[in-house]
Image (cartoon, rainbow, N blue to C red):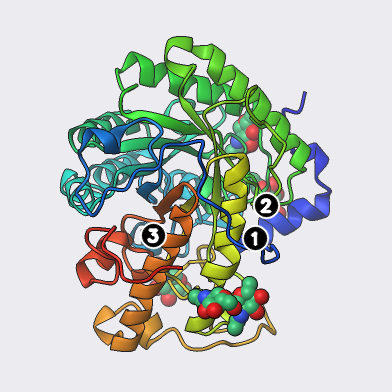
Amino acid sequence: MLSSVRNRLAPSVVAVLAAVLLCCRATTAVSYTPADQQPTRFMHIDLNGAAAGGADAYADNAVPYRGVCLGGWFVLEPWIVPSLFNPHINGTFNNHSVWDEYSLVNYIGMKDATPMMLEHWDTWITEADIAEVAQAGITDVRLPVGYWMLNPLPNETWVPGETYFFDRFLGWARKYNIRVLLDLHGAPGSQNGQDHSGHRGPLDWDTDLTVQTLKMFILYIRDHGFTDVIHAIELVNEPWWSVDPKIVQDFYVNAYSAIRQSSPSFTNTLNIVFHDNFNMNAWGGIMEPPAYTNLFQDSHQYHCFDNSLLAMDYAGHLNYTCNNTRPAIVTANKYHPTFMGEWSLATTDCPQWANGFLNGNRWEGTLSPGDPVFGKCTGNFGTDVTQFTPDYRAFLRQFTEMQMDAYEAASGWYFWTLKTESAPQWDFLMGLREGWIPNPVTKREYHC
Ligand SMILES: *[C@@H]1O[C@H](CO)[C@@H](O)[C@H](O)[C@H]1NC(C)=O
Ligand SMILES: *[C@@H]1O[C@H](CO)[C@@H](O)[C@H](O)[C@H]1NC(C)=O
Ligand SMILES: *[C@@H]1O[C@H](CO)[C@@H](O)[C@H](O)[C@H]1NC(C)=O
Ligand SMILES: *[C@@H]1O[C@H](CO)[C@@H](O)[C@H](O)[C@H]1NC(C)=O
Ligand SMILES: *[C@@H]1O[C@H](CO)[C@@H](O)[C@H](O)[C@H]1NC(C)=O
């Protein structure tokens, strides 16, 4: 039984993971190959700039997906909602600082954490937000959830009550004709040791409990009547690059069959999504049809957590998108329909706590001693968008459109994330309102 990954990691790896930060939303290093043709296995539709809502846009496997992720909602991340964490900057729990949802809630205690979380769930994402993105041509959302929503472990305390807000959101999604990819972002024991799994620290991923959690979500969706809204389920988000790929694959195989068997009238055709374990082009020949059907690959690409990308100028970022990532995702798409499930417009890691609570950043060289310095987190890279120069806004528009174009050459994209408190390049609604994200999202001038 591969129920625990911990035994397979050297203690030094565990220690490094405990210390490593959100840093390694890894980039995929691949060599340049010519762009391939469009995939033919899946219907390719073009909304021609129309707002979402047509029957075609809702067709089950219609690609490309044009989506946003709803980050920081059911799984807190300090950099998305720093206002919840900053008042507890001196707080400690289990001998470490408050640095993720679990430690925040347990440090504050249920009496105060419950009203805080209820208020957050009620207000962070609203029906008006969903209406606004649907109007802009968004057809899909990727919804991160933690296991604790349905399967809080007996040895842990979490604030209960998320399911009310989950149901309410799914009702909005139905109303605005938005398809939902349910993404298990936090797995029992933590699949990556990052704050965005709910637990920062040791990587003690329990794959059996993760399969159990996925089955609970399936039954919940079925019995609460949301099988029309949830068209896909992601087995787990970002299992860490240091986890043995064999463990990840075995988990995917087990979880896939458990879901297919769990409620066949619903799950026989439900789309199932696997994250590529930060290795976009490693999945050819693995879990292929006809044994595996309706199986999608989720890849993530950021330009701000890697020194070689941080060193690029604007033209370099555009070139990388079109001449590196595009051919890579098009190749992956030949084996499994592949979408870019997380991407942003950030070319610096400047937002407060972008690398984890109380940590510095690579851009100003404050993450680790002796790091190179790339620039300052002010002006274009500060939080006040009125300081953004016209040239920089023009770059953001180009970078947005070229990324959308590159990912639509495969099976589409989900921007990370719908909104933030103070991270402009990560904030979809801000980009739409400020004009560097096209509205509708299909209204484009720049292509790869
Ligand atoms: C944290 O501790 C420092 C040093 O004692 C103090 O100056 C600061 O006000 C504290 N911050 C909060 C939010 O309590
Ligand atoms: C916290 O540190 C103290 C002193 O080093 C130690 O005795 C205790 O076991 C630690 N607690 C946890 C939860 O790690
Ligand atoms: C609770 O138990 C689970 C399963 O045994 C384990 O993976 C997890 O790390 C534990 N949680 C805490 C906070 O110790
Ligand atoms: C991609 O590479 C080609 C060939 O070198 C080049 O002409 C083109 O400008 C590059 N694309 C971008 C966006 O830089
Ligand atoms: C453009 O990207 C390709 C693929 O990553 C790379 O080989 C090439 O050197 C880049 N060109 C420039 C001008 O950056």
Q: Which residue is mark 1?
A: 28
- Is there CB contact under 8 Å for labels 2 and 1? yes
Q: Position of residue 294 (x, y in %)?
A: 52, 29
Which residue: 67% across, 61% down? 19
- Residue type highlighted by circle 1: Thr
SS at mark 3?
loop
Residue 134, which numbered label? none
The N terminus - image quarter: top right
Q: Which residue is mark 2?
A: 279
In the image, is residue 76 above or below residue 247?
A: below
The image quarter containing residue 246 is top right
Q: Position of residue 84 (x, y in %)?
A: 35, 57
Q: Specify which label sits upstream in the sequence, 3 or 1.
A: 1
Left or right placement of residue 203 versus residue 402 in this view: right
Q: In the rendered image, is residue 398 in sight?
A: yes
Q: Position of residue 401 (x, y in %)?
A: 37, 67
Query: How many numbered markers are drawn?
Result: 3
Residue 359 or residue 404, whichever sits in front: 404
In the image, is residue 401 above or below residue 294?
A: below
Residue 114 or residue 236, whichever sits in front: 236
Residue 53 or residue 169, whichever sits in front: 53
The image quarter containing residue 31 is bottom right
Ligand 5 closer than 8 Å to the CB at disc 1? no
Q: Specify which label sits upstream in the sequence, 3 or 2.
A: 3
Quick one: label 2, few (<14), some, or many (20+) residues within 10 Å? some
Left or right placement of residue 331 versus residue 285 in this view: left
Quick one: label 3, few (<14), some, or many (20+) residues within 10 Å? many
- Residue type highlighted by circle 2: Asn
Q: Which residue is mark 3?
A: 80
